Structures are given as structure tokens and as C-alpha cells.
């Protein structure tokens, strides 16, 4: 009887230690976050290229144009490149957000889940801001009426600024959370 009790206690202890070890999936979550961050690095490189091209096409150069249709035609390949970059960025944004969402569904601490939730919100809001660019450029290219173009630019600027501001506010929360929990968030 005594041997059975000792054996049962040992089995119970082994079972509990395995259950505790298998219950926490922080390492797996960290791996997904690392993968997401690698995707975000690629995305950021494309965002820089896209922003530079957007500024070149839709900034001061556009304000100096006398014949907007000729400008569109002359820069068609650059506009196509900009649209392509934005579509690539959108795909990468989906991939990186998906990795964070996968991590948030794992068994991790509540604090880590909170961090992942805020990061997911920030990524989605940033994706919303980037999703405005390609449709705007496409509409700009199709519109011939200068007054409508001015209205499109005004609407785009407003929506883009509002969405970017919301994303930046969420980023501040993410950064504050990281600062407040330096041992929790693995970079």
C-alpha cells in the first residue's frame, strides 16, 4: 500500500509539472512575435519607398503642374509602382497582424495578452491608414476634373491624418506598455 501511495504521489507531481510546463506557451508566442517583427521590418522598407514615391508624385511636383493629364501619363510607371508597393504592404500587414493574433490566442500571461491586443489594434489601424493610398491614387488617375481631384486630395489628407493619429496613439500605448513591462516583452 505504501509503495502505491508513493508511486501515485510521484505520478501526480510529474503530471502537475508537465501540465504547468505545457500550459504556458510564451516561448511559442515570442517566436510568432519575432516572425511578425521580421515581416514588419520588410514592410517598413516598402513603406519608406512608398512614402518617398508618394511625396514625389503627389507633393510639390503636382502643385507645379499645368497639364495634369500629361503629368499622369508622364509618370504612369511611377504611379503603377506606387500602387504595387501599397498592395505589397497590405499583404505584409495582414501577415504580421495574423502572427500577433495567433500569439494572442496562446496560453500566455494576461499582461502579455493585453500587450498583444494593443499591438494588434495598432497594426490594424496602421493598415487602415495604408489602405487609403492605393484607392486614392487609382481614383486620382481616373479623375479628369481638377475640382474633383482637389476634393479627393482634401478627403484623403483628412482621412489619412485621422487614421495615422489613431495609430500613433495606439503605438504610444504599446511603447508605454513595453516601458512599464520590460521583462514581459521580449524584443
Image (spheres, grey):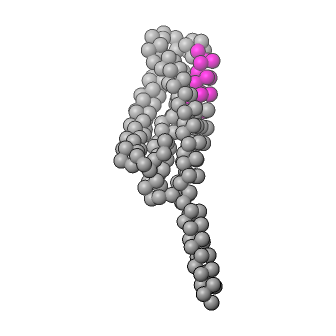
Above or below, comparing residue 15 to residue 54 in the picture = below
Quadrant in which the N terminus is drawn: bottom right
Q: In screen coordinates, is 60 left or right of 68?
A: left
Above or below, comparing residue 29 to residue 69 in the picture = below
What residue is drawn where x is 51% and y is 18%? 57
- In the rendered image, residue 86, in percent from the top left (x then y), is placed at 57, 30
Above or below, comparing residue 76 to residue 18 in the picture = above
What residue is drawn where x is 49% and y is 41%? 187
Is 114 or 120 nearer to us in this picture?
114
Give the number of callouts: 0
What residue is drawn where x is 45% and y is 31%? 156
- In the rendered image, residue 91, in percent from the top left (x then y), is placed at 61, 38
The magenta stretch spans which residues? 75-87
Q: In screen coordinates, is 131 left or right of 118?
A: right
Is 42 or 72 nearer to us in this picture?
42
Residue 134: quadrant of the picture = top right
On the question of residue 164 being in view, the answer is yes
Is 66 or 175 nearer to us in this picture?
175
The main secondary structure of the magenta stretch is helix
Q: Among all residues in the image, which is located at the extreme bottom?
A: 1
On the question of residue 162 being in view, the answer is no
Q: In screen coordinates, is 27 left or right of 64?
A: right
What residue is drawn where x is 44% and y is 50%? 184
- In the rendered image, residue 60, in percent from the top left (x then y), is placed at 44, 14
Please tell me whether residue 38 belongs to the stretch shown in magenta: no
Residue 84: quadrant of the picture = top right
Is 176 or 149 nearer to us in this picture?
176
- In the rendered image, residue 36, in percent from the top left (x then y), is placed at 56, 42
Amino acid at each position: 500500500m505504501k509503495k502505491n501511495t508513493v508511486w501515485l504521489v510521484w505520478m501526480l507531481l510529474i503530471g502537475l509539472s508537465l501540465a504547468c510546463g505545457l500550459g504556458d506557451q510564451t516561448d511559442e508566442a515570442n517566436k510568432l512575435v519575432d516572425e511578425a517583427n521580421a515581416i514588419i521590418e520588410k514592410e517598413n522598407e516598402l513603406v519608406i519607398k512608398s512614402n518617398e514615391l508618394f511625396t514625389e508624385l503627389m507633393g510639390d511636383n503636382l502643385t507645379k503642374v499645368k497639364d495634369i493629364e500629361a503629368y499622369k501619363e508622364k509618370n504612369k510607371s511611377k504611379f503603377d509602382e506606387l500602387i504595387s508597393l501599397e498592395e505589397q504592404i497590405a499583404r505584409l500587414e495582414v501577415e504580421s497582424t495574423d502572427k500577433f493574433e495567433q500569439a494572442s490566442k496562446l496560453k500566455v500571461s494576461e499582461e502579455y495578452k493585453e500587450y498583444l491586443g494593443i499591438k494588434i489594434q495598432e497594426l490594424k489601424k496602421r493598415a487602415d491608414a495604408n489602405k487609403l493610398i492605393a484607392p486614392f491614387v487609382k481614383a486620382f488617375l481616373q479623375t479628369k476634373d481638377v475640382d474633383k481631384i482637389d476634393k479627393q486630395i482634401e478627403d484623403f489628407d483628412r482621412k489619412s491624418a485621422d487614421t495615422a493619429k489613431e495609430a500613433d496613439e495606439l503605438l504610444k500605448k504599446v511603447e508605454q506598455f513595453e516601458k512599464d513591462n520590460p521583462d514581459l516583452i521580449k524584443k
